[in-house]
Image (cartoon, grey):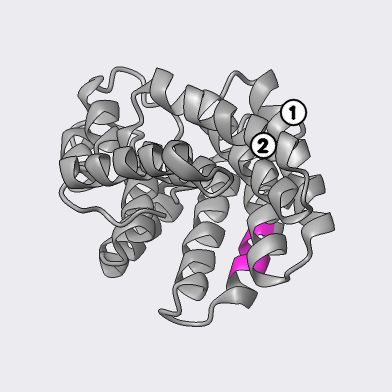
């Protein structure tokens, strides 16, 4: 599933979020075209599209190069490097091309550029957790990174990132057999997704909860996830 939040673009129309939440990334990007300073958000949206649809890699790469070229401060360059790491991670995860070394280098560069307390640091911690969990297969390091990201997301009131930190901490708890913590984390992630109206991310949360249940409750959760997927045009559930 999509594991990204985007820098706010002052004055951007609220329809950008509504389109993104429904998996209409290309349309959301088009709405951002007139807004100065939106290059990084455009890139992040196209990278998220790659994660859900497994396509659009060249468009995401082009948008990211533009954002990198326009970055004018260390924090902007650090945020762009974080997106570079995310795109390289996804390409590796989905076997488009092995870019694991590029992903690690980009996230390290992001850590060096972002100032202490920068709003982009929790997202960086989260993505370091993804690399630790999915590429390095190191759940201990992943859990530590997700916990830092979770604390930072709460401190910065980044609700969408909190959605993802809850989900991934719950997933690690489930792997450890701690089903109570897993249910709590998945339920919190689902609750926040529904509050945000993040429809494209709701089906994965329903399926995560269904995996911990059995009988009619599990069937009901899976049926609702399937209904949402059909509603969104069959976007793959990540």
Quadrant of residue 85 within the rendered picture? bottom right
Magenta span of residues: 103-107
The residue at which mark 1 appears reads as 151
Front of the two marks 2 and 1: 1
Q: Secondary structure at mark 1?
A: helix
Compared to residue 47, the image places residue 195 above or below, namely above
Comparing 110 with 172, the one in front is 172
Q: Determine the CA span between mark 2 and mark 1.
A: 8 Å
Residue at image coords 60%, 67%: 103
**Residue placed furthest toward the front:** 215
Residue 60 versus residue 151 in the image, above or below: below
Could one spot residue 118 in this view of the protein? Answer: no
Give the x, y percent position of residue 235. 25, 53
Label 2: few (<14), some (14–19) or many (≥20) C-alpha neighbours in 10 Å = many
The residue sitting at 52% across, 58% down in the picture is 86
For residue 158, side relative to residue 51 (left or right): right
Mainly helix, strand or loop, the magenta region? helix
Taking depth in this image into account, of 53 and 12 the one nearest to the observer is 53
**Residue 52 on image: x %, y %:** 34, 56
Discs 2, 1 touching: Cβ within 8 Å: yes
């Amino acid at each position: 599933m999509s594991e990204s939040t985007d820098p706010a673009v002052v004055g951007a129309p609220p329809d950008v979020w509504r389109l993104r939440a429904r998996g209409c990334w290309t349309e959301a990007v088009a709405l951002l075209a007139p807004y100065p300073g939106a290059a990084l958000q455009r890139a992040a949206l196209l990278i998220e599209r790659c994660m859900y649809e497994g396509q659009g890699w060249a468009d995401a790469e082009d948008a990211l190069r533009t954002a990198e070229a326009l970055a004018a401060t260390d924090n902007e360059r650090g945020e762009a490097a974080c997106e570079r790491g995310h795109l390289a991670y996804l390409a590796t995860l989905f076997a488009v091309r092995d870019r694991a070394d590029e992903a690690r280098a980009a996230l390290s560069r992001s850590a060096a550029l972002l100032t202490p307390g920068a709003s982009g640091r929790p997202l960086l911690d989260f993505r370091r957790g993804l690399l630790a969990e999915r590429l390095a297969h190191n759940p201990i390091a992943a859990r530590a990174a997700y916990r830092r990201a979770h604390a930072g997301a709460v401190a910065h009131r980044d609700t969408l990132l909190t959605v993802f930190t809850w989900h991934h901490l719950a997933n690690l708890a489930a792997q450890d057999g701690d089903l109570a913590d897993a249910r709590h984390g998945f339920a919190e992630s689902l609750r926040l997704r529904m509050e945000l109206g993040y429809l494209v991310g709701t089906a994965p949360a329903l399926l995560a909860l269904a995996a911990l249940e059995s009988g009619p409750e599990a069937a009901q959760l899976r049926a609702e996830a399937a209904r949402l997927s059909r509603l969104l045009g069959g976007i793959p559930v990540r």
